[in-house]
Image (cartoon, rainbow, N blue to C red):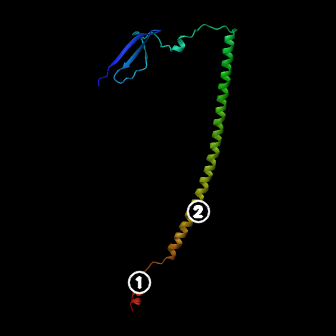
Amino acid sequence: MSKTSQQNSTPGVNGISVIHTQAHASGLQQVPQLVPAGPGGGGKAVPPSKQSKKSSPMDRNSDEYRQRRERNNMAVKKSRLKSKQKAQDTLQRVNQLKEENERLEAKIKLLTKELSVLKDLFLEHAHNLADNVQPISTENTTTNSENTGQ
């Protein structure tokens, strides 16, 4: 299976060319790419959302300016409140985790003490068992076998 591809270059805005590529073998199309049109680059690529906007200064007394400022001020307040709430939530979570950590450390201390006590009891019990068991000597074994044989 041979792979054939086709590239078309179309001149764009602000010295930018758009390259369209189609790959026929796989049936897939690639997304257009922005590349500089000339060898010198010609400038930065400007996204379409920025190209259509006018950069004329607004009159500070206009209704549109006031509405934009109001919306921006509300957005800033909302953002700051959200940020403040997030910081408070994080601080609360930190305090919860500290308390949990203290509880767990106390539990570790308690369990370590309990383990130490149980180890001591076990070793004492094992030592007592070892003292109570008398080793079997060979003399006792032969004497017992002679007595049972008679």
Percent coordinates x, y for residue 2 in the rendering:
29, 23
The residue wearing badge 1 is 141
Q: Name the residue: 42% across, 84% down.
A: 140
Q: In this view, does 23 lie to the left or right of 84?
A: left
Percent coordinates x, y for residue 94 in the rendering:
63, 40
Above or below, 50 relative to 117: above
Percent coordinates x, y for residue 3 in the rendering:
31, 22
- N-terminal of the pair, mark 2 or mark 1, is 2
Give the number of the disc on residue 117.
2
Percent coordinates x, y for residue 31 in the rendering:
43, 20
Secondary-structure class at tag 2: helix
- Amino acid found under the numbered disc labelled 1: Thr
Comparing 72 with 93, the one in front is 72
Q: Is residue 146 left or right of residue 131?
A: left
Label 2, residues with CA under 10 Å away: few <14, some 14-19, many ≥20: few
Above or below, 14 relative to 137: above
Comparing 56 with 96, the one in front is 56
Identify the image quadrant of residue 78.
top right
Identify the image quadrant of residue 35.
top left
Secondary-structure class at tag 1: helix
Q: Name the residue: 38% across, 17% down.
A: 21
Q: In which quarter of the image is the N terminus?
A: top left
- Amino acid found under the numbered disc labelled 2: Val
Q: Name the residue: 35% across, 21% down.
A: 24
Comparing 3 with 99, the one in front is 3
Q: Name the residue: 66% across, 32% down.
A: 85
Label 1, residues with CA under 10 Å away: few <14, some 14-19, many ≥20: few
Q: Quadrant of the C terminus?
A: bottom left
